[in-house]
Every structure is written in structure tokens, then in C-alpha cells.
Amino acid sequence: MELDEFIVTAKAACYVGGGAVARPCRADSHDLSFRDGEWEYLDSYFGGTDFIGQEVVWHGGKAVWAMNYYGYILEPSLIDAQQVGDVIKRSLSLLYAENRFLGGFEHIVGDYAYRDANKGDVQQFHGVEIILYEGEDVYRLDYHGGMIKS
């Protein structure tokens, strides 16, 4: 299995797929984990409505890739945490079905528009995920990451 393929599989199995909740590795963190042979993935984050976290991939016990993210609701009168989660899960499930997690994506979920834009590739990237309601940004997540080199 290649790194890109593993990342997509792990992401799809964890947050989007309602996957295995792991024992928190830090006080007050929410952790999701996934394993496949020599590959291991951990998504560890803090918060709920506004949240910050990190995803890490290990191969053979060595950290090889990571991504940091911070997401927050911009207009709580127009969207709540449950709606954000629903839009993200429905949108990302379609993106992951294309066997990718980068490269930009747009999807409509009811009255909301999901948009993801990024630059780079699995080696090094940065991007933004937004949800719009009637053309107004109501949620935003900034992310960046890439390969870990010793």
C-alpha cells in the first residue's frame, strides 16, 4: 500500500466513517486511530465547535507524514457544530471515494456549499476548507502538512 492510498483509507475509516475511537493520548483530546499492516494513523484533536488537531501517519513505527488543522464556526446563527459535521462527512465521503484527499473539491449539501482548495501534494501542502450559506462563509478550517524527514 502506498502512503496516499493509506491516508485516504484511514481518513475514510475514522472521522468520516465513524471509526474506532482510541484512548486519548493527551488530556482532553479526542483520538481516532486506524491500522493496516505496517501503517498506522492517529487523528488527535481538541474542542468541538472550534477545534484544533493533528493527523500523523507511521510506517514501521516511524512517523512519516503529518497534517495540522484548525476549524471554527464563523456564523453560529447560520450553522451549528452538528450541521458542520454533517456537511463535512457527506462531502469528504465523496472525495475519498475518488481515492484522494487533496486537489480541491466542491459539493452541495442542502442549503450549504462545501469547498476545499489547496496547493501542493502529499509531500508538502496547505489549504482551506470552507462551508458557505447563501454565498457567505459560515465555517472555515485551515490545514497544512507533508512528509516528515529526519
Image (cartoon, rainbow, N blue to C red):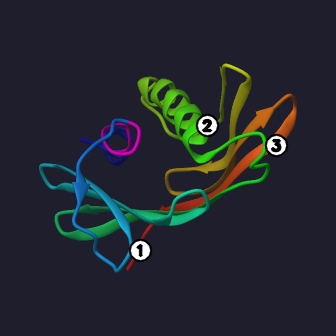
Above or below residue 134? Residue 149 is below
Kindly identify which residue carries mark 1.
Answer: 149
Q: SS at mark 1?
A: loop
In terms of image quadrants, where is residue 124?
Answer: bottom right
The residue that appears at 34% across and 35% down in the rendered structure is 17
**Image quadrant containing the N terminus:** top left
Which amino acid type is shown beneath numbered disc 2? Gly
Rendered image: mark on residue 137 = 3
- Residue 99 point in image, percent of width and height: 42, 29
Kindly identify which residue carries mark 2.
Answer: 103
Rendered image: mark on residue 78 = none
Q: SS at mark 2?
A: loop
> Is 13 part of what is drawn in magenta?
yes
With 99 as the anchor, is 10 left or right in this view?
left
The residue that appears at 46% across and 24% down in the rendered structure is 98
Q: Nearer the viewer, mark 3 or mark 1?
A: 3
User: Could you tell which of marks 3 and 2 lies nearer the N-terminus?
Assistant: 2
User: Could you tell which of marks 2 and 1 lies nearer the N-terminus?
Assistant: 2
User: Could you tell which of marks 3 and 1 lies nearer the N-terminus?
Assistant: 3
Which amino acid type is shown beneath numbered disc 3? Asp
The residue that appears at 80% across and 32% down in the rendered structure is 133
Distance Cα–Cα, label 3 vs label 2: 20 Å
Instruction: Report the span colored magenta.
Output: 11-16
Taking depth in this image into account, of 56 and 124 the one nearest to the observer is: 56
With 52 as the anchor, is 38 left or right in this view?
left
Which amino acid type is shown beneath numbered disc 1? Lys
Q: Residues within 10 Å of mark 2 (few under 14, many from 20)?
A: few
